[in-house]
Image (cartoon, rainbow, N blue to C red):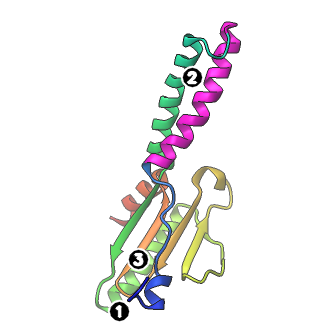
Amino acid sequence: MIGRSVEEILLVMVSGPGFFTTFAYYFGLTAILGCVAASRTMGLPYNHPASVQAGLLLGIFAGGAGVLFNRSVSLELLLPRKARERTALQQQVNQALEQLFFEDLDVEREDRVKVYQRPTGAWLSGRLYVQWDAEQVRIVGRANVMKKLKAKLD
């Protein structure tokens, strides 16, 4: 923090859970629940190797799916130097967000980050965080949504 201005500190945006955290979350929960479900289904104790293996296999599958779709990904776009091109890029980003049915939540934040969310199905797609600064725009959201957004911006 020493040597950094207050403006630089405010422009730092949290990027959310990445690969490892997302995998660990989905793997751990699914492995435990899968082990319990497998032991009940097969009529075996919880610590039996067959129920533990079934839980681990389900956990690996769920962890992989969680990483594929729900990890946080950031997209950074450099802003053009000309004001007209900057305005065009801002309109393109806003149009892409509208096409994906994201709406601005009008949340007041100190770090100048705009928060977007879908009015329906928000728990599936999560929120998008968009931060404009002097040189770039940074967008953070779930991997499956960011893939669609990037395709619309290209």
- Picture quadrant of residue 48: top right
Q: Give the range drawn in magenta.
A: 20-44
Residue found at x 38% / y 61%: 150
Q: Position of residue 127 (x, y in %)?
A: 58, 62
Whether residue 59 appears in magenta in the rendering, the answer is no
Choose mark 1 or mark 3, whichever is in front: 3
Q: Residue at x 57, y 35 (%)?
A: 28
Which residue carries the number 3 mark? Answer: 137
Q: Main secondary structure of the magenta part?
A: helix
CA neighbours of label 2 inside 10 A, class few (<14), some (14 to 19), many (20+): many
State the CA–CA distance, disc 3 to disc 2: 42 Å
Estimate the x, y position of residue 93 in percent, counting from the top left. Answer: 44, 73
Whichever of callouts 1 and 3 sits on the residue coming sooner in the sequence is 1
Mark sitting earlier along the chain (1/2): 2
Tell me if mark 3 has few (under 14), some (14-19) or many (20+) residues whose alpha carbon lies within 10 angstroms of its own.
some
Mark 3 or mark 2, whichever is nearer to me: 2
Q: Which amino acid does the dot numbered 3 rest on?
A: Val
Q: How many residues crowd mark 1 within 10 Å: few (<14), some (14–19), many (20+)?
A: few
Residue 82 location, x and y as percent?
A: 30, 91
Residue 152: quadrant of the picture: bottom left
Seen in the image, is 44 located left or right of residue 92?
right
Q: Which residue is rendered at x = 67% and y = 8% of the image?
A: 44
Whether residue 102 sits left or right of residue 9 in the image: it is right
Residue placed under numbered mark 1 in the picture: 83
Quadrant where the image shows the N terminus? bottom left
- Work out whether residue 78 or residue 109 is closer to the camera in this orientation and state it: 109
Q: What residue type is labelled 1?
A: Ala
**Cα separation between marks 1 and 3:** 14 Å
